[in-house]
Structures are given as C-alpha cells and as structure tokens.
Image (cartoon, rainbow, N blue to C red):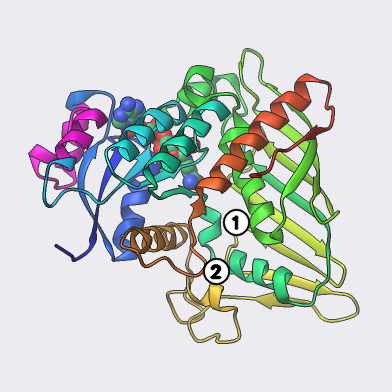
Amino acid sequence: MLGPVRYAMIGGGEGAFIGPVHRTAAAIAGNCRLVAGAFSSDAQRARRSGEAIGLAAERCYASFEEMIAGERGRSDGAEFIAIVTPNHVHAPAAIAALEAGFPVLCDKPLADTLAAAESIAEAAARTGLLVGVTHTYTGYPMVRQARALVAGGGLGAVRRVAVKYTQGWLAKAEDSEGKQAEWRVDPARSGLAGAFGDIGTHAFNLVQFITGERMTRLSAEIRAAVPGRRLDDDGAAMFHLEGGGRGTLVASQICTGDANGLEISVWCEEAGLHWRQEQPNSLRVARRGKPEEIWTPGGDRNYLDPSAMAVTRLPSGHPEGYFEAFANIYRDFADSVRGNVPEQPSYASLADGLAGMRFIQAAHDSSAAGAAWVELQGDE
Ligand SMILES: NC(=O)c1ccc[n+]([C@@H]2O[C@H](COP(=O)([O-])OP(=O)(O)OC[C@H]3O[C@@H](n4cnc5c(N)ncnc54)[C@H](O)[C@@H]3O)[C@@H](O)[C@H]2O)c1
C-alpha cells in the first residue's frame, strides 16, 4: 500500500502547542497522512483529541503503548511515529516505537537527560531505524543559504559567532503556571535543563548547522533568575568551534518583551552573515568595502544554493515561515522513511539530537563548576 506516508503522533492533544503545528506542517508537506494518535496522558482527553481532528475512533488510543501495539498489527498501520510530548516521555516513547519497528521523528530536546538520549541512540543502533529531530530552524531556506555560503562561498574561515535566543514569556513567577510552562519548569518533566534545553539546544544546533563545525568546548553560567524556579531560565555561554572560531550563546526566557528572539551572526574572514527568526526571509551578508546584500527566497531565484531552493515552495515575494520550515522537515523525513533520503535532509539527525544533549550537560557542568571550561564530547 503506497500513497502518502502514514504517521501516528504521541502527544499534541487538546490545548497543546507543538502537536497541532506538526500536523499542519505535515498537511502542507503533502506526502504524509496522520492515521493514529495517543494524544494525551489522560485516556479520555486522548480519545477526544483524536476524534476532534477526524481520526477513526479505534485509532485514537488511550496510551502510546496501546497505539504502538495497535498500529503494529495493522496492514495500513503507521509507517513512522512523531513524538511531541514533554521531554520526559521522549525516551520511553521513542524506544518503544523503535523496538516495535517504527522510525521516530522526535521533537527537541531529544530527551530529558543525556542518559535517556543515549538509550534512544542504543535502540536506534539495535533496530537500524531512522530517528530525526525537529530543530525547526534547519527547515528555513535562508538558514540553508547561510550554511551554503559558509561552506562554499569563498568567505574564509569562521572567526566569531553570536547567537541569542531570547523570550520573555517566563519572566515572572506567575508565568510558571500555564500549560506550556508548568512542565518546562519541573525537573522531573523538563529534565536537566530549563531554558538551555528548551531553546538553548535550538541555538546550539543552528550554530553547528550554519558553520558546519562542531562546538568543542564551552564555559557557561546558567541560573534560575526568577526566585523559586528549580531550573535555569536564563544563561550565557562562551564557546570554541573546531576550526578555531569563538562564539557566544545566550538562551533566556526572562527577557521581558521578547517573543521568539532567535538571532545569529556568523563572521567569516571576508563577510558577516546575519539571520533573525522573526524576519526569516531575509539573510543579510555584509562584505568588507562592498554594499550589503540581502538574500531572499523564491522558486524563481535560481542563483540560490540547491539546498535552499529545495525548501523554497513559492515564487519570490510570497512569505514562507514557521509552518513551511516544519513542513520541509516532515516532507524530507517521510521521504526518508520510504527510502528516498534527500541529499541534505532538513531534519536534524539523531547525532545532532545527541550533540544537543551533550551541550545541555556540558553547560550544566560548567555552570556548576563556576563557569569552568568543559570539553564537548564528539561522536567518535
Ligand atoms: N521544535 C520546536 O520549535 C518546538 C516548539 C515547542 C515545543 N517543542 C517541544 O515539543 C514538545 C512538546 O512541547 P509543547 O509546548 O507542545 O507542550 P504541551 O504541554 O503544549 O503539549 C504536550 C502534549 O503532550 C501530551 N502528553 C503528555 N504526556 C503524554 C503521554 N505520556 N502520552 C501521550 N501524550 C502525552 C499532553 O497531554 C499534551 O497534549 C517538547 O519536547 C518541547 O520541547 C519544540
């Protein structure tokens, strides 16, 4: 049975944030179809959530264990499973899915702890199945153009990077109570880190994606700025890249007034590149002694790198954003599940997800040791 790639979802029930974004993105992707879900830890809400979006009642499961068993036994069962729960459920759900034969597309961070992420990697190695991670920003055309310019644009070595991911939605103690907030400030469900895991891993992934280089060491200070918080809501790190470049990374959810302030600058020997998530269709390139260039996406811009063109869906001048970036990730992952792996997939790999967990652990260890420099382990 071919047709669209069938997928099932764990998490993303009534009132959830990212599950509905994944489903919208998958619909835009056009090559996937949601066939089943275990949308909540509450059985009734799970069923209600699935039926509300038109799934057959028998495929709205009460738990992910039930869903994995049910879908495994069907000839029209899901071909991969998307995980969009709070972090502490990622590893048990991913390992159960892999052991039952399902590739996994997991939201970030890969797990709540490094040990849990390593267990996912072991299950993936045992089963030989694909695991992707939805580091959304790798699905944007101008991020991919930036990466291509650094890789082959004659800009020379990367000398300095400045990345910041600043939000203000957890600026006050009372902000800890909302549905999206309450598990993020709880070590049992968020994991080792708060803001450094939630948004710091996106910033970290973006640095490695655009520069094409591994972060090798860091010195970090992370803290709970709001009294009573048990996890970091604010922090900064200095880091080294494998090519000798240096950088700074700020991840904070107490920056009053900021919405989704992810911004990165990469200064190479011959030019600086600047990208802002809130204006994602514009990549500014500033070369020494020359007028600034503003690169923009568009299917008719055939001078863009093929990796940027591959994720551009519309003619120039038609804005594409968050949903489309996510849709690119779904399209590439679904194609990969059927064996058509794109040359440069827009989803982050399992190795990228693991690297993000090592980054969290290193930032935590460094901060606990008074911002001592800590080496980041590679894949070797
Ligand atoms: N890629 C991104 O940019 C991005 C953005 C936001 C969130 N996320 C990640 O997505 C995940 C979810 O975040 P959110 O903001 O949507 O959280 P949320 O609280 O809005 O939604 C979580 C959903 O998971 C369900 N759930 C909890 N335990 C479950 C279980 N055992 N089985 C099935 N469902 C269960 C909840 O009922 C809820 O529907 C987190 O890991 C978060 O870090 C990623």
Q: Answer left or right for 250 relative to 326.
A: right
Residue 112 spot, x, y in % from top left: 51, 28
In this rendering, does residue 12 appear at all? no
Which disc number belongs to residue 252?
Answer: none
From the viewer's side, name the closer residue of 335 and 87: 335
Which residue lies at the image location 14% right of the left edge and 62% below the top edge?
1
Q: Going by the image, does 80 lie left or right of 258?
A: left
In which image quadrant can residue 85 be found?
A: top left
Q: As shown in the figure, which amino acid type bears the numbered disc 1?
A: Gln
Local packing at callout 2 (Cα closer than 10 Å; few below 14, some 14-19, many 20+) is: many
Using the numbered discs, state the Cα–Cα distance from disc 2 to disc 1 in whole angstroms: 12 Å
Using residue 335 as the reference point, say whether residue 373 is left or right of it: right
Q: Whole-percent x and y of residue 54?
A: 14, 47
Start-end of magenta stretch: 45-71
Q: Which secondary structure lies at badge 1?
A: loop
Which circle, 2 or 1, is nearer the viewer? 2
Image quarter where the C terminus lies is top right
Precedes in sequence: disc 2 or disc 1: 2
Q: Main secondary structure of the magenta part?
A: helix
Residue at the (37%, 42%) spot, across then down: 127
Q: Is residue 310 on the magenta stretch?
A: no
What residue does disc 2 label? 141
Total labels: the figure holds: 2
Q: From this view, report whether residue 191 is shown above or below residue 379.
A: above
Q: Considering depth in this image, is 379 or 344 the residue closer to the camera?
A: 379
Q: Reply above or below: 43 against 257.
A: above
**Residue at numbered disc 1:** 277
Residue 271 visible here: yes
Depicted 32 relative to depicted 64: above or below: below
Q: Secondary structure at mark 2?
A: helix
- Looking at numbered disc 2 in the image, what kind of residue is underneath it? Pro
